[in-house]
Image (cartoon, grey):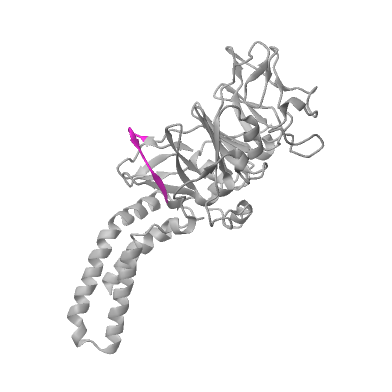
Amino acid sequence: MWKRTAQGRELHFYLAGINNQNFLMRDRETGSWWQQITGRAISGKLAGTSLESMPNDELTFGLWKAELSQEHALVLAPVAGHDKDYDKGWEAETEKYPVPLSFPGQGLKDRDVILGVQLGGQARAFPVTKVRGQTPVEDKISGVPLVIVTAPDGVSMRMFRSRWNGSDIELYRDTETDGQSTDEHKADGQSPAGQNTGGQSKDLRLLDSLGNTWNFSGCATSGPATGQCLEKINYVKDYWFDWKNYNPKTTVYSH
Amino acid sequence: MVLTIFSLGLFLIPAFIIRPFTHQSAIGLRIALFVKWIAPTLTLLALLGVLAIAWSLWQRSSWLLRSGIITSLLLCLASTVMVQQNYFEWMFNPIKAAGFVAPGDSHLDDKEMVMTVKIGPEARAYPIVQMAYHHILNDTVAGEPIVVTY
């Protein structure tokens, strides 16, 4: 997701080609060619310009709704006539095609899905199978301490800089409340206890050694840090071969 | 004949290089984009060239040669038209006018994945199952122009 203003100008993009399984897009204003994965213009009047990244999340619909409070919220509606095209099995279908490039040697298969992070000039790939559901996953890249957490829905993930008040903090799961539903967090007043709602009625609770409790939004709900939030780190969810192609020196998380 | 092959090449070379699921080297991409840039003008010139040659040869041509001329002409015409098209959009149908609904009015299942953004007082969710098909959406959230890609 990118901000589509460049050099003081609002641009409108359209799909124009595929380059190594990412796509190329062009802007209607200058006809320049841009790469989807890097947000950089590789040809045309704006060649060399980079779009600014727009921080975003990938969550389950249920979790996104549960986190809403005062916002004016909207969901993209399906375009009429395309219901058949929205194939939930598209990922499985894509896997039948050959991979354009292959990068063996770092313990990952080409189509392994990873969370890619770039910090301080270093790139690292976190295999989803290694980090999803393993809250908290702690690591350090270029001296920046980070933590990856999975929401109670078992799917949604966020990454934060685990640093507060000038020091690195270590986070632990709150084993006292884990596995229990907390009635005060029901989403939309639905889902009575007993139904399998993927744990929407639970909230993630992480503790640190300074007496703070942190939730899935990275904000402290109790303790001296109450009301403050950890800095969110943006990651790219990608196939290993594609991430490696654009980040040749990337390391891989392994613990 | 030569002009026809040249004209077809102008369309086919970039189409071949930028086909999905294959690797494009940086040089390959440069070539493809360059050819794409010159193609509209050159295919038009080639078409005019073939028309001129066809015109001068037509009277003296056998039935066989005339068929050849017609074929050349049609191929050149096809190429001239194709270099002006963005066939990727045929495959993936861009969203022309995005519609949005309130979360309560959406039929999306709670377990479906969405890409979400929060800017100021606005929160928006883009279902991945839809973005995986349309690939691009230009949107404006709380006055900020963004492009959602998948």
**Residue appearing at x 19%, y 87% in the figure:** B60
**Residue B126 image position (x, y, % from top left):** 55, 42
Is A14 within the magenta? yes
Whether A39 is drawn above or below A24: the answer is above
**Residue A95 image position (x, y, % from top left):** 61, 54
Q: Quadrant of residue B32?
A: bottom left
Outermost residue to the left: B56
**Residue A197 image position (x, y, % from top left):** 74, 38
Provide the residue span drawn in magenta.
Answer: A6-15
Q: Is the magenta stretch mostly helix, strand or loop?
A: strand
Query: In the rendered image, is residue A21 in sight?
Result: no
Is A197 within the magenta? no
Q: Quadrant of residue A190?
A: top right
**Residue appearing at x 60%, y 29% in the figure:** A159
> Going by the image, does A194 lie left or right of B74?
right
Query: In the rendered image, is residue A8 in sight?
Result: yes
**Residue A250 image position (x, y, % from top left):** 54, 36
Outermost residue to the right: A194
**Residue appearing at x 76%, y 22% in the figure:** A174
**Foreground of the two, A180 or B103:** B103
Q: In which quarter of the image is the C terminus of chain A?
A: top right
